[in-house]
Structures are given as C-alpha cells and as structure tokens.
Image (tube, rainbow, N blue to C red):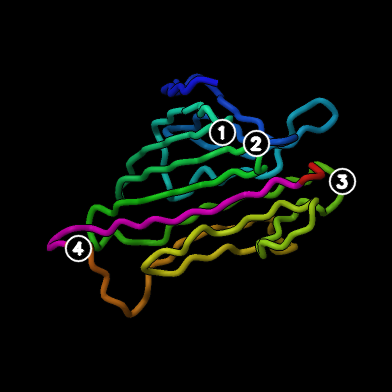
Amino acid sequence: MMFSSTFVETTLSPGVQVGNCRLWWSYEGDRWGHRVQVRRDGEWRDLLVADPEGACVLQDLFLEQRADGCAEFQGMGQSAAGIHSASIVCDPGAGTITFDLATRFREMSHVAALGLAYLHCDVSGSEVFDGDVSGEGESDEVVIEPLIGPKVGRYSIEKPSAAERRTRIEWVPPSGEVLSGGRSGAGLTVQWGYRIRIPTGA
C-alpha cells in the first residue's frame, strides 16, 4: 500500500474500519465530530459518540493512509481559549484507536480543563459495552486507557454511572501551582491522549 495524505472536505463523512468497528467523522456546525460504531445486522450502529461541545475543537481534517495499513486522521482548530491539534491513529492489526491531542492556550488566563465526553449507546441488548477504564477489561468490553500523563495538571478517565451513560476523559490544570509557559507573556501547551481498545467480540 502506498502512502497518501488527503484534505477531507466538510461535505464528506470519512470512516476507517478497525475490526468489526469503525471510527466515523462528520462535520457538525463549525467542527468535526466523531463516533465509534459497531457492525450489527449489516448496519453500522453507534457505540461511542463524542460530545460535540468538547473542548478540543477540530475544524480542518486530513486523512493519511500509511504503508503499514494504519490510517491517521490529523486535525487542527481554534477556539477562544487557544489552538488545538490532534493525531488519531486507527490500527486494525492491534484493534486500537489512539488519540494524541494538544492545546496551546493563548494566554495563561485562558488555561482551563480540556475534556471529551462519550455517550455510550447500547447496541447489543446487554451491558457489555459499558466502557471499562481500568485497562484490564474482558474481551467484550471497550477499554479506554490514558497515554503517558501530562507534565502538569491532572488527567482522568471517569467511568459512566448508571444514571448517566457517559465516559469523561479530561485534563485538569493544577490547583495551587504556578503554571509556566516557558517565556514571559506566553500561554501554555498541554499534551494528552488516550487509546480505545476495540472488543474482540464486537
């Protein structure tokens, strides 16, 4: 397979299959939203749906097809708080989707929590897809695990409660600490990420 990189037009809805699941994108309002879907009865059904109001805003999206069979989505965007970038790698061989995210806050006063919430959708008639976050899930569970932790602040993945079927993945700035952007008057760059392991039984 040859290497290729393509700018994704906002009129398109690109998707990459990982096992019996896929990562699917759509342009909603002024930004790209994504969801993880599973194949059921010949149809793609939502498994995890990202909150469109998440703090990591992606307005431009590129799709890179790699020679090793992986596909990488590269995204960039801006909000009032700062500049956002993302690398999302779909690895069918490993059965994973890896999100590597970064935000450059414009000013230190703009530093705030960065979060992404996923709504869990029941597509199987059971509770097997309820988002294990320990990294030790059974083969029929979606496992969400953090990448290497940030140098500043706190990084957490909150499992959904029975009342609200949402998993929240969040970077929170430190409290009681002096944040430094490395030079006078600069903002702060925060890097964080997580990996979704697709259930083998999906």
Q: Mark 4 = which residue?
A: 182
- Could you tell me which quadrant the N terminus lies in? top right
Q: Sort mark 3 into few (<14), some (14-19) or many (20+) by Cα contacts within 10 Å.
A: few
**Residue, x 12% and y 63% (percent of image)?**
184
Which comes before the other along the chain, label 3 or label 2? 2
The Cα atoms of the two marked residues, 4 and 3, are separated by 51 Å
First-in-chain label (2 vs 1): 1
Whichever of callouts 2 and 4 sits on the residue coming sooner in the sequence is 2
Between tags 4 and 3, which lies in front?
4
Q: What element carries label 1?
A: loop
Residue at the bottom extreme of this rendering:
176
* Image location (x, y in percent) of residue 62: 43, 28
Real-space Cα separation, disc 3 to disc 2, in angstroms? 26 Å
Q: Mark 2 points at which residue?
A: 92
Which residues, given as a range, are shown in magenta?
183-199
Label 2 crowd (10 A; few <14 / some 14-19 / many >=20): some
Disc 3 to disc 1, C-alpha distance: 31 Å
User: Label 1 near label 2: C-beta < 8 Å?
Assistant: yes
Lateral position of residue 38 relative to residue 25, left or right: right
Q: What residue is pinned by disc 3?
A: 125
Instruction: Decide whether residue 128 is among the magenta residues.
Output: no
Amino acid type at image mark 1: Cys
* Mark nearer the N terminus (4 vs 3): 3
Dot 3 or dot 1: first in sequence order is 1
Q: Nearer the viewer, mark 3 or mark 1?
A: 1
- Residue 178 appears at what percent x and percent y? 26, 75
Q: Which of marks 4 and 1 is nearer the N terminus?
A: 1
